[in-house]
Image: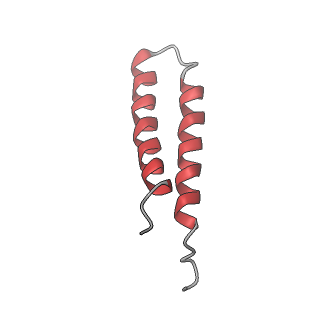
C-alpha cells in the first residue's frame, strides 16, 4: 500500500461529507430567503449523496 492510499480513507471522507451536509442543512434552515434555503438544500443533498456513495461503496 503506497503512502496516502489507506483503504479506510474514502469511507471516512464520505462520512465527513454526510455530516457536513447535515450541519449545513441545519444552518440553512434558519435562513429567511426561500431561494437561498432551497439552493443550500440542493447542494447539501448532492454532497450527502456523494458522501453516501463514498462511505457505502462495494468493496468486493
User: On the image, which quarter does residue 7 sit in?
Assistant: bottom right
Instruction: Please indicate whether residue 15 sits to the left or right of residue 34 in the image.
Output: right
Q: How is the image coloured?
A: secondary structure
Instruction: Please indicate whether residue 42 sits to the left or right of residue 1 in the image.
Output: left
Identify whether 46 is placed above or below 29: below
Q: Nearer the viewer, residue 11 or 26?
A: 11
Q: In the orientation shown, which residue stands out farthest toward the bottom?
A: 2
| Residue under the image location 46 percent in, 16 percent down | 33
List x then y, in percent, for residue 59.
45, 67
| Residue under the image location 46 percent in, 36 percent down | 44
Q: In the picture, which quadrant includes the N terminus?
A: bottom right
Q: Nearer the viewer, residue 19 or 30?
A: 19
Identify whether 38 is placed above or below 11: above
List x then y, in percent, for residue 48.
47, 42
Identify whether 56 is placed above or below 44: below
Q: Nearer the viewer, residue 4 or 55?
A: 55
Instruction: Please indicate whether residue 33 sits to the left or right of residue 29 in the image.
Output: left
Q: In the picture, which quadrant includes the C terminus?
A: bottom left
User: On the image, which quarter does residue 49 sit in?
Assistant: top left
List x then y, in percent, for residue 41.
44, 29
Q: How many marks?
A: 0
Identify whether 50 is placed above or below 1: above
| Residue under the image location 58 percent in, 27 percent down | 26
List x then y, in percent, for residue 16.
59, 50
Q: In the orientation shown, which residue stands out farthest toward the front?
A: 60
| Residue under the image location 40 percent in, 29 percent down | 39
Amino acid at each position: 500500500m503506497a503512502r496516502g492510499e489507506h483503504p479506510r480513507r474514502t469511507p471516512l471522507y464520505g462520512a465527513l461529507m454526510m455530516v457536513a451536509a447535515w450541519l449545513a442543512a441545519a444552518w440553512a434552515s434558519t435562513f429567511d430567503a426561500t431561494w437561498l434555503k432551497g439552493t443550500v438544500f440542493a447542494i447539501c443533498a448532492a454532497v450527502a449523496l456523494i458522501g453516501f456513495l463514498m462511505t457505502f461503496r462495494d468493496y468486493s
